[in-house]
Amino acid sequence: NRHEWVAAASLTVGAAAIGYLAYKTLYSKDKGSKLLVNLDIQKDNPKVVHAFDIEDLGDKAVYCRCWRSKRFPMCDGSHTKHNDETGDNVGPLIIKKREA
């Protein structure tokens, strides 16, 4: 019957479309690129790591946590623009000597 064939074909096409969309959502290589925090800092390194001796910090050090600073790992205030554009609330890490 022609109606049964059309219904079966429609169901098959619909299932294939849902399967394709599920595959793209779950397994697409591009999926993670929108979730990256580090967009361009030392991308040739497998892991970006910075270490500082506490004695060398002086009275205060302000470090970037948004990964947008042009002076990374030091904060340059780029988080303000990032927060305005995305609705995020990230701010810097501030390390300072305890006030006496």
Image (tube, rainbow, N blue to C red):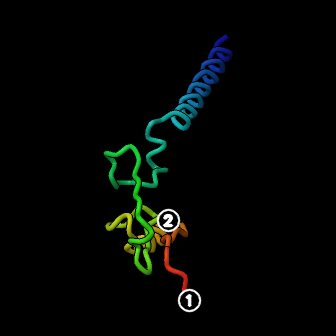
Give the left or right position of residue 1, taking residue 54 as reference: right
What kind of residue is marked 2? Thr
- Crowd tier of the residue under label 2, counting other residues whose Cα lies within 10 Å: few below 14, some 14–19, many 20 or above: few
Query: What separation in Å lies between label 1 and label 2 (alpha carbons)?
Result: 38 Å
Q: Report the mark closest to the observer, 1 or 2.
A: 1
What's the residue at 58%, 28% (across, down)?
Answer: 19
Q: Is 7 in front, or is 71?
A: 71
Q: Is residue 63 above or below residue 44?
A: below
Asked if marks 1 and 2 touch (Cβ < 8 Å), the reply is no
Quarter-of-image position of residue 72: bottom left
Q: Secondary structure at mark 1?
A: loop
What x and y, as percent, mark residue 94?
Answer: 49, 74
Q: Which residue is tagged 2?
A: 86
Q: Is residue 45 above or below residue 11?
A: below
Q: Is residue 25 above or below residue 76?
A: above
What's the residue at 41%, 47% (across, down)?
Answer: 47
- Crowd tier of the residue under label 1, counting other residues whose Cα lies within 10 Å: few below 14, some 14–19, many 20 or above: few
Furthest-bottom residue in view? 100
Disc ID at residue 100: 1
